[in-house]
Amino acid sequence: MSGELPTRDEQGYGQYCPISRALEVLGDRWSLLILRDLLLGSTRYNDLARGLPGLSRSLLTKRLRQFERAGLVDRVGCDYLMTESGRDLEPILFGLGAWGARWTFGEPDPAELDADLLVWWMHTRLDTADLPGRRQVFAVRFTDDARRYWIVVDRSVPSVCTTDPGYPVDVTITADVASLYQVWLGRLPLAQAQHAGRVRFSGQLGVTRRMPTVLRLSPAAGLAVPAAEEPYLRATA
């Protein structure tokens, strides 16, 4: 023990106010993004770590323990499950996302574009219910990133491979990283991206035609303003 007193940040804000109390639980770095992924269905520690590549595992462990103590999550075996208190954060987080989509969400910075993370996000959002067979394989090829990806959906369970899994490919998705990000997040309509050749689907015709419904977008996509509409919104704000 150093004998030093805790700082104000460690003690809390020292204000009897529901906003300050909430920030003492939620205001630390990475907290809201961890809660975002929990609300979107990630329950396993390794899946949370994979979806937050800039977050150290030690800090992820610390935040999850904080959430347990605060009653936001319960640890059940290997799963972290949201409690009623945690689930009540959904409209708050998506409200924050709506604000960000309107006021801060412009063109992507190249440093924000991570092909590995994008494919990880996408792999849980493929709706293959109407496709034939028990296994579907989607290859993802980026025109500006040499890494190769395969998304395998086997009996409705998706996984990401970075080496060839050895199964026949049903559809190859080809795009530059920025274009696929912007489609995924709702800033670039898929039909527009296809028409411009920025996103292409190749493979079995019966499957490629279904890709606009198979490739479900990010849950945040409905919050984004398509880039073509931004000048109008700025002019009328």
Image: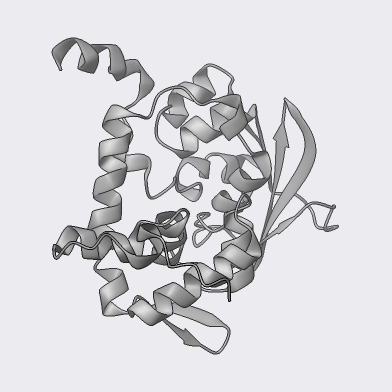
The residue sitting at 44% across, 66% down in the picture is: 38
Q: Is residue 34 left or right of residue 86?
A: right
| Residue at x-position 25% and y-position 38% | 99
Question: Does 41 sit above or below residue 122?
Answer: below
User: Extreme bottom residue here?
Assistant: 77
Q: Can I make out residue 70 in this image?
A: yes
Up the image or down, 222 lies above or below 150; here it is above
> Is the residue 90 above or below the residue 121 in the image?
below
**Residue lying farthest to the front in this orientation:** 3
- Number of numbered discs: 0
Q: Position of residue 20 (x, y in %)?
A: 22, 59
Q: Percent position (x, y) of residue 209?
A: 53, 39
Q: Name the image quarter holding the N terminus.
A: bottom right
Reply above or below: 75 against 188. Answer: below
Q: Quadrant of residue 178?
A: top right
Q: Is residue 133 visible?
A: no
Which of these two is toward me, 158 or 1? 1
Nearer the observer, 204 or 121: 121
Q: Residue at x 82, y 58 (%)?
A: 165
Type of colouring: one colour
Instruction: Say which quadrant the C terminus sits in.
Output: top left
